[in-house]
Amino acid sequence: MNIPKSIVRIFLILPNGQILVQLRDNIPGIASQGMVSTFGGGVEIGESPMQAAVRELEEETCLKTNYTMEFVTTFIYKKTRNNQETIQKNHVFLARISNFKEIEIKEGVGFVVLRKDVDFGKVNAGEGSQRAWKLLQEYLN
């Protein structure tokens, strides 16, 4: 499996300030199996990170409306899988959700609701997701 050179990471925030993150499934070959992660995925050729974030959010949660998408930041992450090293751009987004009941999870086994001040380092999450979480906390403060 190829590692995308550019990905989007999306956190969902509810009106009460709680953050939704994805709970990954245990499918062999996927990143962060069984861990908490951001929603998102690879940026396709000819697609902007914002377009990828909107597409990935719809694919993974069925949300088409009732949210606003905000760009948070981009960070560079050196990722190694199967002895292949890639420098990966991670574009972090925040989707402000107005109607929680419209979410239908299509990827992963579900989602986890977290307070925005939780220590993500103590959550079973991959290194890239942990770094994105710290940047999100800085953005929200």
Image (spheres, rainbow, N blue to C red):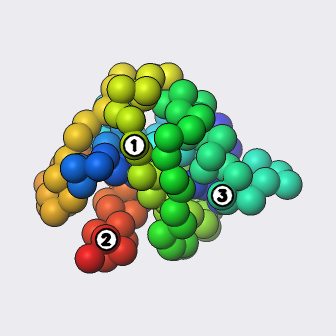
Check disc 1 and report the residue beneath it: 98
The amino acid on which the numbered mark 2 sits, given as a three-letter code, is Leu
Look at 60% across and 50% down and name the residue there.
53
Q: Position of residue 74 (x, y in %)?
A: 54, 72
On the image, the x and y values in percent for residue 58 come to 59, 34
Tell me the distance, in whole angstroms, between the alpha carbons under discs 3 and 2. Answer: 19 Å
Q: Which residue is mark 2?
A: 140
Q: Which of the 4 image quarters holds residue 119?
A: bottom left
- Mark 3 or mark 2: which comes first in sequence? 3
Q: Nearer the viewer, residue 52 or 1?
A: 52
Q: Residue at x 25, y 37 (%)?
A: 112
Query: Which residue carries the number 3 mark?
Result: 50
On-image quarter of the N terminus: top right
Above or below, comparing residue 105 to residue 82 in the picture? above
Q: Give the x, y percent position of residue 75.
A: 51, 73
Instruction: Check disc 2: other Cα within 10 Å, few if <14, some if 14-19, many if 20+.
Output: few
Secondary structure at badge 3 equals helix
Q: Are marks 3 and 2 in contact (CB under 8 Å)?
A: no
Q: How many marks?
A: 3
Could you say whether the residue bearing mark 2 is in a helix, strand or loop?
helix
